[in-house]
Amino acid sequence: MIASLATVGASVALAAGSKEATAQEPVASSASPASGTTYTGDVIDGKKVISALDVNDLQPGKKHLLYFQGVETPTGQHWYVSVTVAKGAKPGKRGVLTSGVHGDEMSSIHTVQTVMNQLDPAEMSGTVMAVTDVSRPALESMQRRWPNSGRGIDLVDMNRVWPGNENDVTATSRHAGLLFNRLLRPNADFAVDFHTGTTGFEVTAFNIAEMDVPEIKAMVELYPVGQIFDNPTYPSVLHNAFIAAGIPSFCPEIGAARHLDLEMIALFVEGTMNVLKHHGIVTGSMGRTGKDVSVFVGNSSFPILATEGGVVEHLVKLNDKVEPGQKVAIQRNSFGEVVAEYTSGIAGEVTGQRSDAMSEPGNPLVFILFRDATTNGAVTYPE
């Protein structure tokens, strides 16, 4: 789940090298707001299929349900991605909401669907586009990673390949390139990429954001959630690809994977509707914001990794404050004997815990969010 920065850097270098050796250089994309919407002529379940989108082409004052034609499967068909566009009756800002970059993150999908169901295009100014199943093959089996079969079975984390490359050596990167160049980037004035914890590891309700960017800070502070992770994280995640393209973006994290946390979902729906009001897309009074809750802002995440195999017993809960030296978990073997005790090395708040009851050595057990005055770059985090 978590890779060291050295590993991430090495992976990026290897990927760059393989692109130069085996893949064509990216061709100039025809997908820009000026190029218009391209319909393939196909229709799936009554919904038209597109290979490029300019939301300016869509009829205002209504919702549009489309399929975007993604990368080809091994059999030569395509992975089709669901696209919902609420096109306001009046012009205004364009927001993009994404989920399903990881295939086991159900609460993120439900959050975006709930926001879209609350929108009335006839009363809106501007556009909100939602893409809820970005990594379709991962979602088909409700697993985190994309099952790539190019060189035998491999599992690719799609949130490490953005903005992608339409001519890359992996289907995952090509799919990301198609979506980013032809669907997401051309239609976004701001973007929110929703996630949850991964299978076997749950997290609190928190936002990942670069708080030194005023446009991002203004949006993040509109969420009534208890934690903010102020860190750029990995360069190849989707919200950072938006930022690199000049589009303010951030990443909400909504609890555990593989199920719906309706209580947490409600917080992020409320916050997202506040963001849409902030940008003038919808009207109405603001809901609760960060001012209404006690928000803890940290810029680093301290991982506690299992040193033994066995059953894990947590001694603290999500959002609990911890102090250096405080015991946070123990581990027992099959005889019930305590084989390991785990303590915090810093003062902070619990932001993630292993939810699977057993663990082998090396698995993350606890992540603690804290403030580090020496941090000046990306760190590992429980995404």
Image: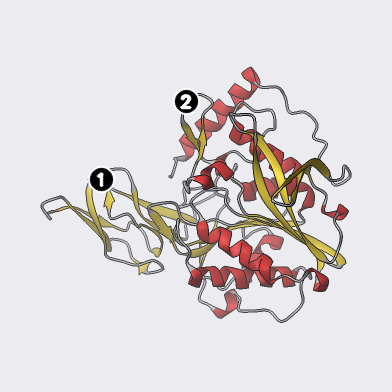
Q: Which quadrant is the N terminus positioned in?
A: top left
Color encoding of the figure: secondary structure
Say which quarter of the image contains residue 317: bottom left
Q: Secondary structure at mark 1?
A: loop
Badge 2 is on which residue? 152
Q: Which mark is residue 307?
A: 1
Above or below for 228 versus 341: below
The answer to whether 132 appears left or right of 378 in the picture is: right
Residue at 28 percent of width and 55 percent of height: 357
Residue at 56 percent of width and 73 percent of height: 224
Residue 14 location (% of width, % of height):
54, 26
Above or below for 169 versus 358: above
Residue at 69 percent of width and 68 percent of height: 275
Say which quarter of the image contains residue 208: bottom right
As rendered, which of 383 and 335 lies closer to the eye? 335
Q: Amino acid at mark 2?
A: Gly
Residue 306 in view here: yes
Residue 16 location (% of width, % of height):
61, 27
Q: In this view, which residue lies farthest toward the top? A: 21
Q: Which mark is residue 121?
A: none
Mark 1: give few (<14), some (14-19) or many (20+) Cα within 10 Å: some
Q: Amino acid at mark 1?
A: Thr
Mark 2 or mark 1: which comes first in sequence? 2
Q: Secondary structure at mark 2?
A: loop
Residue 253 location (% of width, % of height):
52, 59
Residue at 47 percent of width and 66 percent of height: 261
Q: In this view, which residue lies farthest toward the front? A: 45
